[in-house]
Image (cartoon, rainbow, N blue to C red):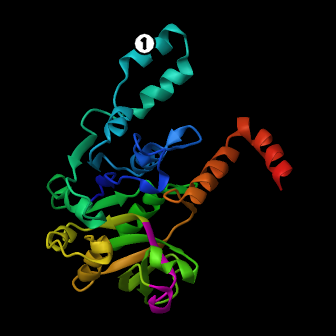
Amino acid sequence: MKIRKAVFPVAGLGTRFLPATKAMPKEMLPVVDKPLIQYAVEEALASGIEQIIFVTGSGKSALEDHFDRSFQLEETLKQRNKKELLQVIESIVPNSGTIIYTRQSEPLGLGHAIWCARDIVGDEPFAVLLADDLIQSDVPVLHQMVQEFDRLRASMVAVIEVPKEETSKYGILETEEPVSGTIRVRRMVEKPPADQAPSNIAVIGRYILTPQIFSILGGHHKGAGGEIQLTDAMSKLLHTQPIFAYKFQGVRFDCGDKAGFQMANLAFSLERPEMRDSLQAFIRTLV
């Protein structure tokens, strides 16, 4: 089946970015001039996704408003003949019915957030995108994965290599051989300490999952941090279905981390011709 639906878990509180996220969803933090969530939604739509499913929580109205019409702003831009800006604002809003919202009433983890979308996804494979993981690439990473899914017809995770001392921050994989391209997964461990990690191959926020994951998540088994972990559910799925690790083409920025967020702003700013020269000159004065 074609990958038509993508789930975006966006109910988190963003405590690592307080006080900026006290009244603003962390997904609305801007990289250059676009919020993180917009990059993720654009990646999904460019990869053939037809339905965006936001799993939200309280305090996320700014996110919902961002992907809705703003008639007063649009009219003001028209009156001021700001055609290019008007086009940008109008392009943010997908066609009616493209975005669906559901609530995660309790902060019980990523696995629980995905389970909350079960009735909307239904009995078909689907994608999951975490907006915190911003990826700079010529071809959208989800598009790369969809092409692999069309060949393999199995669940997939995007992976990177991390320093051994950082394995406790990620879901870590044991694979059949060193990861190059697409490799079958043997085992998955959620946030293992460095001395217990099976490798340094870490899962990041791009997944393609089969609907069988929902029945496992529905057990509400808690793992690391007392939360319902997606990695744990995928470990159980491995007993009945193959899962593949995909080493994508692109550079990933961890925008859930303050340093990673600043790196993303710098990297994406340097892609802009109108900003590049000024930034490079400023960077030279710093280093």
Residue 15 vs residue 158, the one in the foreground: 15
Residue 265 position, x and y percent, is 62, 48
User: Is residue 141 at all visible to an observer of this figure?
Assistant: yes
Label 1: how many Cα within 10 Å (few below 14, some 14–19, many 20+): few
In the image, what residue type sits under mark 1?
Glu
> Is 23 placed left or right of 135 in the picture?
left
Q: What residue does disc 1 label?
A: 75
Q: Which residue is found at the position 30% from the left and 64% from the top? A: 110
Residue 6 position, x and y percent, is 31, 54
Q: Which residue is found at the position 42% from the left and 87% from the top? A: 174
- Check if residue 194 falls in the magenta segment: yes
> Is 98 placed left or right of 88 in the picture?
left
User: Is the residue 16 above or below the residue 29 in the image?
Assistant: below
- Check if residue 139 falls in the magenta segment: no
User: Is residue 37 at all visible to an observer of this figure?
Assistant: no
Q: How many marks?
A: 1
Residue 62 vs residue 96, the one in the foreground: 62
User: Is the residue 172 above or below the residue 258 in the image?
Assistant: below
Residue 235 position, x and y percent, is 29, 81
Which residue reaches farthest front? 19
Magenta segment boundaries in residue numbering: 193-204
Q: Which residue is found at the position 40% from the left and 71% from the top? A: 157
User: Is the residue 37 above or below the residue 114 in the image?
Assistant: above
Q: Which quarter shows the C terminus?
A: bottom right
Q: Which quarter shows the N terminus?
A: bottom left
Which residue reaches farthest top? 79
**The residue tagged with tag 1: helix, strand or loop?**
helix
Q: Which residue is found at the position 35% from the left and 73% from the top? A: 152
Residue 141 position, x and y percent, is 48, 59
> Is 140 placed left or right of 156 in the picture?
right
